[in-house]
Amino acid sequence: MPRLTIEELQKLREKARKTVTLREGGQYRAKINVHMGTCGIAAGAREIMSTVIAEIEQRDLKDVLVTNSGCAGLCSKEPMATVELTGHAPVKYIELTPQKTKEIIDKHVVGGQILAKYALGIGSEKTDLSKE
Amino acid sequence: MEAKTKGTGYRLHLMVCAGTGCVSNHAFEIKAALEKEIARHGLDKEVLVVPTGCNGFCERGPLLVVQPDNIFYQQLTEKDIPHLVEEHFLKGRPVKKLMYTPPDEKTPVPVLSDIAFFKGQVLIALRNRGLIDPEKIDEYIARDGYVALTKALTEMAPEDIIDEVMISGLRGRGGAGFPTGMKWKYVRETASTNGDKKYLICNGDEGDPGAFMDRSLLEADPHSVIEGMVIGARAVGAHEGFVYVRNEYPLALHRLNVALNQAREYGLLGKNILGTGFDFDIKVHRGAGAFVCGEETALIASVEGRLGEPRPRPPYPAQSGLWDSPTLINNVETWANIPVIISRGGKWYASIGTITSKGTKVFSLVGKINNTGLVEVPMGITLRQIIYDIGGGIPEGKEFKAVQTGGPSGGCIPKEKLDLPIDFESLTEAGSMMGSGGMVVMDEDTCMVDIARYFLSFTQDESCGKCTPCREGTKAMHDILTRMTEGKGTEGDLVLLEQLAHSIKDSALCGLGNTAPNPVLTTLRYFRNEYETHIRDKKCPAHACRQLNVYTIDPDACLNKGRGCGLCRRNCASDAIIGDKGVAHRVIQEKCIKCAVCYDVCNFNAVKVE
């Protein structure tokens, strides 16, 4: 790395910001929660998680939080994920595939449109311990 | 470059505390175990492990904070890691048994910001605590690092920088509390007689027993100190600086050197900083661990390669310091505050604190306290808030007796002063001092005469011997106190102690000697009756001075509860206990060497101490 000018330092800062925002407890526009109970994992939740992460990185989404939780109780419909846009009720999606996941990110997370055809319903169990 | 791939794409950041406290409790082994388990589950593209500086809650180390949920795990061992990784990081089920449960409570507090220890703290010097890897300059930069430097180099004249520091009201965090802006102004305005050379020094010769503020800061956020120094250099017109760190701080030295190299590589140190034409570089000087080298003139002598002995002031280092040039010397914590003052403004900084003392202060909280650790609190907070709200009070339900602030130069503050709002003046008024921020909490089992003796033995050891009052005077005081703790104190001792204390205070050459009698003077002020009991009754009320204790065995308890078990007799090294199975035991006082083994081993509380 060569010696920086002021502009280069600022550019570096903007690029590096992504590294630390996750740690700063900031506000996120959307949260994707992949259910990772034993049932979920057996049904392919790991692949869904990888898809979510790859998709977010590819689209360079900076305001989407990815998290996971245990079994949601509806093991027969796994893999499942919950998408929650800040200020809106969470939506639970069922029987996911990587293809469906990409579509959900495109339409719901980015576009704000709920994909009713893959959804189980609206509402969710609590997953965030800090709100308990 | 690493920064490009690291950090993005990860859904979890595991912030492993890698301060010295946690490292000595195997934090690096835990980090390795985490990485291994994460890889085993194929999570290495999703979960990032980040070593950070001291988290602060040292009592509960080794620590791990999981972001973005801010979940706090504590007292981890390597064998907890496989379960933790599988349950929380793979399956999303946080592990309750590894979370923090406050003493006397049953439910764990999962989230760091809900834990009482962290709640009352305000972080300025420790602003990046637990949030960055101290060995990655990019992470410091990401958290607005070197923004203040850019501002200072491009938008501000040197006088503007000094004005801002003046407005902030910042006072030296090393102990004396001299107004920082004023010191900077003197150095700026003093013409150098040595070419036009001026120097900058960061004093990291931390030596107070139980103090670890500077070490933690250098380990956790070395760039905040470096940035502060470059700004200071620009303000006073210096081009060379030194960081004086003890050689016994290997981790701090390592991280500081890594940071210096990175800063040089990025052009934030060296020639033509950020292309602005300003030159400044920093060298590290390792101290050999002499307490007196924390005194600025001794420190300067040590940097020059001479014996670390103080000299009379004036001239002050600001006038004639390192190699007879005007020298700006500030403490580690003072430097770490500078970037924030420059970027947020002196006015903002001055809005925190009391009339005379602005901003925050970092304290290391140690001794008889539940939450041992590193805390940063606003000036004006009370001792009670620090000790009870943040510190969690005294362990085992014991009674608070005193808190020692300011190290060997400070004093002991009693229970009656717990509601004292802390600032430079109030602590001095109470007979103690702010010092660099060591806070040693004492409970009812602490003997104040013994504590005064301990601190004097420390200063006596560390006295450089150059001036007579300090060399001979502290020894004379120490001898008197030792006599008292052995039951050989006489009526005139207290008067003699006070006379000695005052003459040492008035005549010693440097701060070490001037303040060495403080622990005696404050304990005499607040705990005089304890001294009197030692002299007149030959008793130690706290039973800490063993030579004054009389050990006896309660025949009832020994026989009825213990049935004369004989454990004390078998363990007595001086055959001072007689008795037999089923017979009450007895101590032969003439033979007793007061080792207290009988007291410690008795399972029936039959051994009494008076």
Image: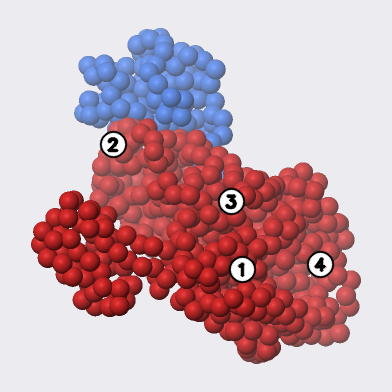
Chain colours: A blue, B red
Is B430 situated left or right of B460 in this image? right
Mark 4 and mark 3 residues within 8 Å of each other at the beta carbon: no
Q: Chain of mark 3?
A: B
Q: Which chain letter matches label 2?
A: B
Query: As displayed, is residue B197 above or below residue B392?
Result: below
The residues bearing labels 2 and 1 have C-alpha atoms spaced at a distance of 52 Å
Residue B500: x %, y % from top left: 67, 80
Mark 4 or mark 2: which comes first in sequence?
A: 2
Confirm whether residue B422 shows in the render: yes
* Rendered residue at 83%/52% (across/down): B167
For the point 26% across and 73% down, which residue is it?
B588
- Of the numbered discs 4 and 3, the one sitting upstream in the chain is 4
Q: Chain of mark 1?
A: B
Which element is circle 1 on? helix
Which residue is labeled 1 in the image? B519
Residue under pointer 4: B183
What residue does disc 2 label?
B87
Amino acid bearing label 1:
Pro
